[in-house]
Image (cartoon, helix red, strand yellow):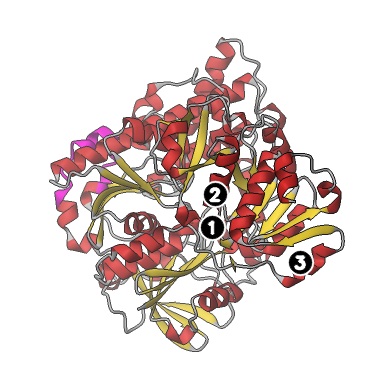
Amino acid sequence: MNILGLHFGHDASITVLIDGRIAAHLLRERISRVKQSVALTRSDIDRALAAANLKPAEIDLCAITSTQDCEIMVGLVEDFSIDYGGEGHPVASPVAELIEQQKIDIGSVTTKGLTDFFGSAISKEQEIFAERWRRIFPQWQDLAEGRIETIGWLDSYITHPLWNKAPTLAEMAGTDYRPVLAADQVQRGFHYPVTVHLSGHRIPGYFIDHHICHGASSFYRSGHEAAGIITHDGGDPTRNLSGYMMVGRGHEVRVIAPHQLGLGGFYRSTGVSLGFDAIGAEGKLMGLSSYGRPRFFEPSFVGNVPGVQGRLKSDPFQAWFGHCLGLAKSRGYELAYGRKDLVTEALSIDIAASTQKIFGESLLQAALSLDAILRRAGMATEKLCLSGGAALNCPANSKLYCEGPFTNLFIEPNCDDGGLSTGAALYLHHHLLGNAVDETAAAANRSPYQGITDITEAPRALVDMAAADHTVAPMGMGQAAERAADDLADDKLVAWVEGASEVGPRALCHRSLLANPLSADAWPRTNTAKGREQWRPFAPAVLQDQCTDWFADCPADSPYMLFTARVRSRQVPAITHVDGSARIQTVDASSGAIHPLISAFARKTGVPVVLNTSLNGPGEPIVETAEEAMALFEKGGIDVVYVAGTRIARQSDEAAISSPAAKATA
């Protein structure tokens, strides 16, 4: 069974699934070079199919999803169209049956959020988010003027009477959701049949609910026979679009209820109000929060939107920011905020720390509620799967790990919207078609190295291009690992490129910039090389079998850089944040040649850790190709680049080699 998973919203992506195993994954931004790119093109589909060694005629089914309120831009894909409904679908849809019974026009219940947004007057409050959409969807003007064909996206699927009550998290914990879990119409009510036309071939397909895709993306890759599931992101909680509580058992992912947390939008809006761009505000706010103290924290803001609104009688974010400013004024803070040059001032860092505490406490409360629900339903488990963009919040994940009711937490590497195409395909394959989860396939699907560009040797053109004024030294991966360890010990900034690119937003050592963690100067040097703010921290990659010797208060197996740990040693200042924390990535043999590299560095220095950050320039996606890595290297700041075992350095830099280790291998 060959399934083509397509995600058309921001962080657009494609997954090709063959018999339950990921055969190719394409993240649109790595090709377009526009961060968080919206929509797909025919070239993207062709690339993904070629990487999986398939032709359009060999696709059996399509699984389609999108970001909430984001229509499908069919007009950007040549020889491609989508019709609602159609024949030949192997799985019935209760939603389609209800729509037909009630004689509802399907087009009237779908959304075209971007078309409507850019076709209307934009308020001052909306402008900053409009600028975000313009940047991630450069064709917005063509869309607004009707030059791009679209089909509306379906955000609302099945419902249940228990979901109409808008309960608090505490009320959810006391509710018996067994009638929902037993309702087959509900549990098979998150897909809608469509027909895809591609290159003259008619392919049955399904629209699949956004958060179902998030939950499936995590659970079916976790390897768990059973697990609780929480998805959460920036969707509108008042429309049940911010996430679900679910449970995975065997080949099924069953929905319990929308939780209406609203954490993603709350967190992003705080970051934007403090002066960050709408693109990346969440990640920067997370890093900034360690500089402050949660002096504005107030328990009334902990919980989901119904709980907070019930207590405060107002919009949670507006009330929160007003609360912070009111306290700040009474406590003598300088009320200067809202610009990038002010984000490290006392007001901003304390708001950031306080917002992080609200986030972490709310997630913990949601997990406690889910645990109570599962116990009441006779489905108690120690395992939890998280997904959705808000699951990128490492401090909250670690708080949940340390204080929550679940002892085993799994988060997939592309838990943001880039993983939705994978979740859509897996949900169709397992939940809808009834295929059992094969552990061998699940283990393979957990690998983060599934990108379509697999660099096993340095391209000849790159070597020729560099030869004139660089030293170019082809070597085996083992020798390259040893030599790179010498370079790091010599305090060089090392670009490391090997194998298939990573999925998700975090660099996991196949497209990474590495530095010496023992050198305090490596922190500012690396920020300068990347064009980032100097206050922003860096993450360590550590040998998995030595993780607990160096880090605490996090899972000992953290391969996707999704948990924050407490640093045990003062030997590694370059990766130790101001509060003594670090966002760790554990490395084992499955990680590729970075494992022998760190092992070699450990033999030379006694430290099984390197600084690891994404290989990209400011505001750019992570590099995908060897040529892009080389272009970044040529801009300066990086000392040496390794591409699939070939070492390239500037001749002027080589003349300055001074360390005995580097001389010995030069």
- Residue 125 spot, x, y in % from top left: 61, 40
Q: Nearer the viewer, residue 5 or 197?
A: 5
Q: Is residue 468 magenta?
A: no
What SS does tag 2 mark? loop
Q: Is residue 192 left or right of residue 613?
A: left
- Name the N-terminal-most of marks 1 and 3: 3
Say which label, 3 or 2, has the lower sequence index.
3
Q: Are marks 1 and 3 in contact (CB under 8 Å)?
A: no
Type of the residue with mark 2: Arg
Up the image or down, 368 lies above or below 254; here it is above
Q: Which residue is mark 2?
A: 506
Name the image quarter holding residue 404. top left
Please report the bounds of the magenta region as a residue range.
Answer: 163-178
The residue where tag 3 is placed is 463
Q: Which secondary structure lies at badge 3?
A: helix
Please provide percent x and percent y for residue 295: 50, 17
The question of residue 176 being in magenta is answered with: yes
**Residue 149 image-quadrant placement:** bottom right
Instruction: Say few, some or many: other residues with alpha carbon within 10 Å of mark 1 (under 14 / 14 to 19 / 20 or more).
Output: many
519 left or right of 325 in image: right
The residue nearer to you, when weighing 231 against 531, is 531
What residue is pinned by disc 1?
502
Q: Please name the amino acid that badge 3 sits on.
A: Val
- Determine the residue positioned at 27% across, 63% down: 189
| Residue drawn at point x = 59 percent, y = 80 percent | 78
